Amino acid sequence: MKIVSEILEQRVSTAMERVAGQKGCAAIVRPSTDPKFGDYQANGVMALAKKIKVDPVTTAQEVVTNLDVSDICESPEVAGPGFINLRLKSDFIADRLLQINADPARQLGIEKTGEPKTIVVDFSCPNIAKQMHVGHLRSTIIGDCICRTLEFLGHKVIRQNHIGDWGTQFGMLAYYFNWRLLKQAEEKVAKGIVFDTADHSIPDIEEFYRQAKTLFDANPDFARGAREYVVKLQSGDDYVLSHWKFIRGQSLSHCQELYDQLGVTLTPNDVHGESDYRDSLPSVVDELRAHDIAETSDDAICVFPEGFKNKEGEPLPFIIQKSDGAYLYATTDLAALRYRVDELKADKIAYVTDARQKLHFEMLFATGRMAGWAPENVELVHVTFGSVLGENGQPLKTRSGENVKLKELLDEAVERAKAIVEEKNPDLSPAKKDEIAKAVGIGAVKYADYSNNRTSDYVFSFDKMLAMDGNTAPYMQYAYARISSIMKKGKDRGINTKGEVASVETPSLTELAELDLAKYLIRYGEAIEAAIADYRPNYLTSYLYELAQKFSAFYTKCPVLDSHPDKRPTRLLLCDLTAKTIKHGLSELLGIEVVEQM
Ligand code: ARG
């Protein structure tokens, strides 16, 4: 089904064009903020009137005369300085409900896009050889929600986990391994020390890197050896590479465990890290030089994309090769951009990183355009986000000032959720308690992040995110579980709930609360569109939260199982569609599990 606001947009625009005698009029149809003004408002007439220099109210009236929406709305009304208020007809709403009900459950009446695109989403992208920390949370889950939503709408999504898996720290680590192995050979007999790289996973490797850095600064022999290894790694020395592969493998299994715990759709197949581009870096530089896009400046090779200036007003360089020959983050991103357009055939590339990389991506996009690697018809978007803060308003850190490990954060969330379940529902089986605790704990962390406007910072608070009231995961999960229990109770009482839902031919929406809920249910597609248009999951959480509240209002006013048998099927239908919508939003689009019982 086409989204209601889109249909109205088209109809009103057409009427405006007729009145103005010109094409390209925007109706600007928005949901009304106050039910007094109907369900939707068209706000475009004022701008049009100003443009063609006529009275806005008279124009709005003429537009209404030329407007045919009788199949959808009551008679449109002109209000204020030239708004057009539109109120949906109950019959139209009822009919939509039936169509949603007839649609295979998962689609909920939402059409796939008529213009499917190939969209590359670059997200998560940790620098590996250390544990993932809270700084990786937002990119990982916001990116995941974007992928899920685009796929649901029918786009081809290519996930790219552009991990930082190449560079000096790997040479240093490889040398550290070697150094420990050599030491062991000397000391083994005497002390019985056994150092086997295979025994170590990421937490150890992270510690080794710390030790390697200390040694690097303190011990000239170590520093010399480490530098040699960095060069050997770059030239593809088999022995050094074997250490690198080991470290990389351990890191990736650590990341995958977290992706699985988070319910994020990334798999090992989506990893396409910096190391994959190492052979194409020389050609990036060569090509840019050959086309006079890059030049040597202060010994480094740089691009000076137009419009980028430093504080002194001098052109800002996008450095692609240092004087010692080393390539940079920028070079790899240029290679990746070229690959994604040429090989992956991307129509659009969305990069999900924190706002601090804004300048990098602006310069990357500008350079990509100059080089012709990203032609104008390929859309490049930087989806930024703010920081996760501690209660003190500073970026979230441990007491000792380190980054909070993502694993520890998630485990704590599940543990806290478990304590709540134990308290509220001590009689559940241990397995059930664990299942609920996992859904609620992980869900709470994700939902709290999603429900904040992504461009703002937010304060991480277990207490707030685990609260049973307010716009939280537990509240939403409870809303779902509550409807499930209504349905279950119905069945226990011998009511054929499924059969009644399927039997509804003309929903009877006589109560205000029924109508209000029904109207909101048919707007799910609008919420999805709004969320994806600007990559803002908080539009989805807001919608779901409001839906749950409307359901609550409905359920307080309108008995369901105890209603008159004539009314019951419609009310069961409203329950069923609410549950399906919440479940779909949470589990399919946000990747948050629902539970039947809480
Ligand atoms: N690894 C980078 C970091 O941790 C993020 C990479 C984002 N993606 C990209 N194509 N540059 O900051």
Image (spheres, helix red, strand yellow):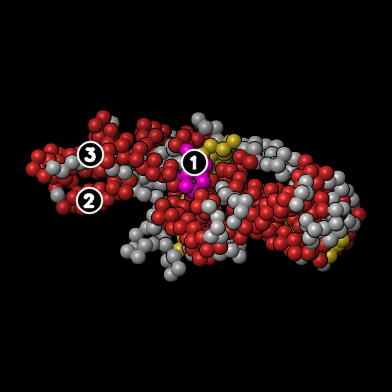
In the image, 564 versus 188, the foreground residue is 564
Which residue was labeled with disc 2?
211
Which residue was labeled with disc 3?
196
Q: Is residue 541 left or right of residue 195?
A: right
Residue drawn at x 52%, y 42% is: 265
Q: Is residue 596 magenta?
A: no
Q: Residue furthest left?
A: 190
Q: Mark 2: give few (<14), some (14-19) or many (20+) Cα within 10 Å.
A: few
Q: Secondary structure at mark 2?
A: helix
| Picture quarter with the N terminus | top right
Mark closest to the chain's N terminus, 1 or 3 = 3
Residue drawn at x 59%, y 56% is: 598
Residue 193 bears which disc, if any? none
Which label sits in the foreground, 1 or 3? Answer: 3
Residue 266 bears which disc, if any? 1
The spot of residue 437 in percent (x, y) is 51, 55
Q: Mark 1: give few (<14), some (14-19) or many (20+) Cα within 10 Å.
A: many
Residue range in magenta is: 259-267
Q: Secondary structure at mark 3?
A: loop
Amino acid at dot 2: Gln
Label 3 lies in ligand 1 vicinity (Cβ under 8 Å): no
Whether the residues at callouts 2 and 1 have beta carbons within 8 Å, the answer is no
Q: Is residue 102 left or right of residue 266?
A: right
